[in-house]
Amino acid sequence: MVSKNVLIMVLLSSLLLVSLALSHYSPEKDSFTGLCVYSSGSISVLYNGTVTVALKKSLEVGKVYTVKGRLRKTNRGLWMDASTVVSANATFPLESLEGVYWYYSNGPVLLTPSKVRLAYPINAFKGSLVRLKGLTYGSKFYPLRVEELGYLKEPKNGMPYPLEGVVLYGGNPATVWNGSEEFRVYLPHGLSLRPGLRIRVLGIVRLYSRITLYVDSGGDVNVLGPAEGKPLNLTQIGDIATGECLVIKSTTRYLRLDCTSLRLYGFHARTGDTVRFKALRRKSSLLCLNCSVVKPRKKLPNGICSFNEGSFARISGKVTWVRVYRNGFGVANVTNGTCSVLLKLPLRLGVSLAENESVTAYGFFTTYRGKPAFEVQSGEDICSGKHC
């Protein structure tokens, strides 16, 4: 009977010891905090800058987790038999990088200016200067914290730059004026820009003899509207000039106006016409954007009696005599009432006049052998007969 009681006491003691042992056993003996740098299917990899741990969980790349369980070595590295997984803050040292955020077709990068591949896109504007904190794992940087620092203030070779300005010369490439210098802008295939537009483009800078910007996406080209319009005498490069002026010289390429020394391109009118224009101001010229003749030259008054050397005028009268010299140069005396002037007829004009012929000419007053004279720049500026 005693032996039986002793046996029962021994069994109870053994059960108590087992219960106590089980109560002190925890499957969460090991703990590890790391950044998820890989996840595929049900397998994920955490990294803390020095140690890599794999576990059988589907986690989000770029997030920090703390896992608890049994950590063991395998022939492929450390493995965690995880019992709990929770999101956490980084308790391990982070690397710091600073550069410009950019992305290509094969993924996002940080330009420092060397290319640092990022494991995933970040919450920042393309082309902005950023400071990143994170970890490098393999060939990629895994950013955890992002601080935007704005955009580069000056263009740097090999770096993105946001250019805002006015298109001076259109097409592709285009020439853009930013208020102080010209940029040559190469656009994606199929895109072009019209002169006079105010734009904002983002591209990679190359410093050649002229600053060049390479834009790789249509989304990086934004049209802000037309350039600012101002009266001609108040304009600067990149403004749209407005005015109404007299054409004092007309060629197949440009017009010379009486109100400015700048040539007007992109519009044709005759010498003596009055032109109203909206034109883009370039460095040394104007480009017509919207021009029209508001007063044809035939409506100018007859200025034959208003001789003023060097001034532009329209003269009209009858030819009283013509003299042609051996070298082909000729002079015609044109009279209207009591006023007369010598009309110079160089051979290059290809114009011949006869006595008593009515003539109208558009040009400048000058002198010939001390007498009042008139000269024209083109044979088109002289007409004779009834249809003058």
Image: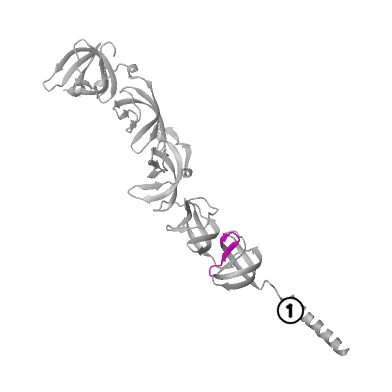
Residue 98 in picture, x, y percent from top left: 48, 59
Numbered disc 1: secondary structure: helix
- Is 230 situated left or right of 267 in this image? right
Residue range corresponding to the magenta coloring: 37-50
Query: Pointer 1: what residue?
Result: 21
Residue 257 in picture, x, y percent from top left: 33, 28
Name which residue lies at 83% across and 86% down: 7
Residue 302 in picture, x, y percent from top left: 30, 16
Of the pair 52 and 98, the residue shown nearer to us: 52
Q: Is residue 377 above or below residue 86?
A: above
Of the pair 85 and 239, the residue shown nearer to us: 85
Mostly what secondary structure, the magenta segment?
A: strand
On the question of residue 86 being in view, the answer is yes
Q: Report the quarter where the N terminus lies.
A: bottom right
Crowding at mark 1 (Cα within 10 Å: few <14, some 14-19, many 20+)? few
* In magenta stretch: residue 172: no
- Is 274 situated left or right of 160 in this image? left
